């Protein structure tokens, strides 16, 4: 069954975010209100087949409560996409997304991530085909940007011609001044092009969406089938409830849950600083929050952070 046929539109998802949207954070979000769809952090297909494998494949861990969930892959070698997709399928994922949008220099400089926009189109096509073959029945999607250093309708047309199930467009270019500013209006010609080409590919929009209300408004205004919310969910992990406010004590309690789950799941195998990144998510927007955050940021390990949060709850 193709998962995308089961949703009401707009399909609202949590954007893939490295060191943020791991199974722990996704379960925390699920415990309040889950979006229609989750994605893993991006997983390097080359990494699955070299010495760092153990660490890389932990990014593919998920709990069944997080379903439906899409695995996001990135890399360069079509063969590795094929084997990684077979592996992802065996793990029970609901789809595979290929990252063609990451704009970190160490990623794009190897023609991976947003570097794919500049890569040989034959290679990109081969990567999509290999992913499709390896993934069996799984739907295949691509997440990209509006272009490399300028808007690039040829790139969007090329991707639409690949008959993807979903094309997610982060409404910025990869580099240059157009990468600084979100331009949602540029997604409209992409939707028109999809319709002109007569393609069934769903189009998701992404960038600077901070609430479900805004997601619904933008979906209507820009005629997209879905919207991805990224940093809006780091700022407010309860964003998918659609409510502006979340009681402070519940927020502290959620942080405690988050810390305990992180401890149980990752223990010392994951850098403690990755957990501290969430201090601002749960401790903000009240008088004295800055001082409390400063204290919590000074903690040296999971247990110290936990007792700091427990103090807030007592
Ligand atoms: C910390 C962080 C990590 C990210 N990691 C990924 C990733 O692994 N894969 C990906 O496709 N995009 C990644 N992104 C980009 C987001 O998915 C999203 O496209 C971007 O943040 C814009 O959406 P937003 O304005 O809602 O945050 C990351 C963004 C952030 C802030």
Image (cartoon, rainbow, N blue to C red):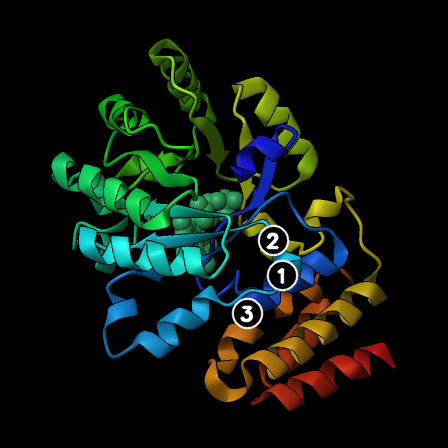
Q: What element does badge 2 sit on?
A: loop
Which mark identifies residue 126? Answer: none
Find the residue positioned furthest to the right.
314
Q: Nearer the viewer, residue 130 or 171?
A: 130
- Mark 1 = which residue? 64
Q: Nearer the viewer, residue 248 or 146?
A: 146
Q: Is residue 253 left or right of residue 290?
A: right
- Mark 2 = which residue? 67
User: Which quadrant would residue 297 be assigned to in this image?
Assistant: bottom right
Percent x, y of residue 95: 46, 46
> Of callouts 3 and 2, which one flags the residue occurring earlier in the amino acid sequence?
2
Percent x, y of residue 73: 35, 54
Q: Residue at x 52, y 40 (%)?
A: 208
**Labelled pair 2, 1 in contact (Cβ < 8 Å):** yes
Disc 1 crowd rating (10 Å Cα; few below 14, some 14-19, many 20+) is few
Q: Residues under labels 1 and 3: Cα distance?
A: 25 Å
Disc 2 crowd rating (10 Å Cα; few below 14, some 14-19, many 20+) is some
**Mark 2 Cβ inside 8 Å of ligand 1:** no
Q: Nearer the viewer, residue 141 or 229?
A: 141
Residue 100 in sight in this render = no
- Mark 3 = which residue? 277
Is residue 168 shown above or below 91?
above
Percent x, y of residue 38: 56, 50
Is residue 286 shown above or below 112?
below
Percent x, y of residue 154: 22, 23
Is residue 221 shown above or below 180?
above
**Mark in front: 1 vs 3:** 1
Q: Residues under labels 2 and 1: Cα distance?
A: 6 Å
Q: Is residue 267 left or right of residue 157?
A: right
Q: Residue at x 69, y 48 (%)?
A: 239
Q: Residues under labels 3 and 2: Cα distance?
A: 25 Å
């Amino acid at each position: 069954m193709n998962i995308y046929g089961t949703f009401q539109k707009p399909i609202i998802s949590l954007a893939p975010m490295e060191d943020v949207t791991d199974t722990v954070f996704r379960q925390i979000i699920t415990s309040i209100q889950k979006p229609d769809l989750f994605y893993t952090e991006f997983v390097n297909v080359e990494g699955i087949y070299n010495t760092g494998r153990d660490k890389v494949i932990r990014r593919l861990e998920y709990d069944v409560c997080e379903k439906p969930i899409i695995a996001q892959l990135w890399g360069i070698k079509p063969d590795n996409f094929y084997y990684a997709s077979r592996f992802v399928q065996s793990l029970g994922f609901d789809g595979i997304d290929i990252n063609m949008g990451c704009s970190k220099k160490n990623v794009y400089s190897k023609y991976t991530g947003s570097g794919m926009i500049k890569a040989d189109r034959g290679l990109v096509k081969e990567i999509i085909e290999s992913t499709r073959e390896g993934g069996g029945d799984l739907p295949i999607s691509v997440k990209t940007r509006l272009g490399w250093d300028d808007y690039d309708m040829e790139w969007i047309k090329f991707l639409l011609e690949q008959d993807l199930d979903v094309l997610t467009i982060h409404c910025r270019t990869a580099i240059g001044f157009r990468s600084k500013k979100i331009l949602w209006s540029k997604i409209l010609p992409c939707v028109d092009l999809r319709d002109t080409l007569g393609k069934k590919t769903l189009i998701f929009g992404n960038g600077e969406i901070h609430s479900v209300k805004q997601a619904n408004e933008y979906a209507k205004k820009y005629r997209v089938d879905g919207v991805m919310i990224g940093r809006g969910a780091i700022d407010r992990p309860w964003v998918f409830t659609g409510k502006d406010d979340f009681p402070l004590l519940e927020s502290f309690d959620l942080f405690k849950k988050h810390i305990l789950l992180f401890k149980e799941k990752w223990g010392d195998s994951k850098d403690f600083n990755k957990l501290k990144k969430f201090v601002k998510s749960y401790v903000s927007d009240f008088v004295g929050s800055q001082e409390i955050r400063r204290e919590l940021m000074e903690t040296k390990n999971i247990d110290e952070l936990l007792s700091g949060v427990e103090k807030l709850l007592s």
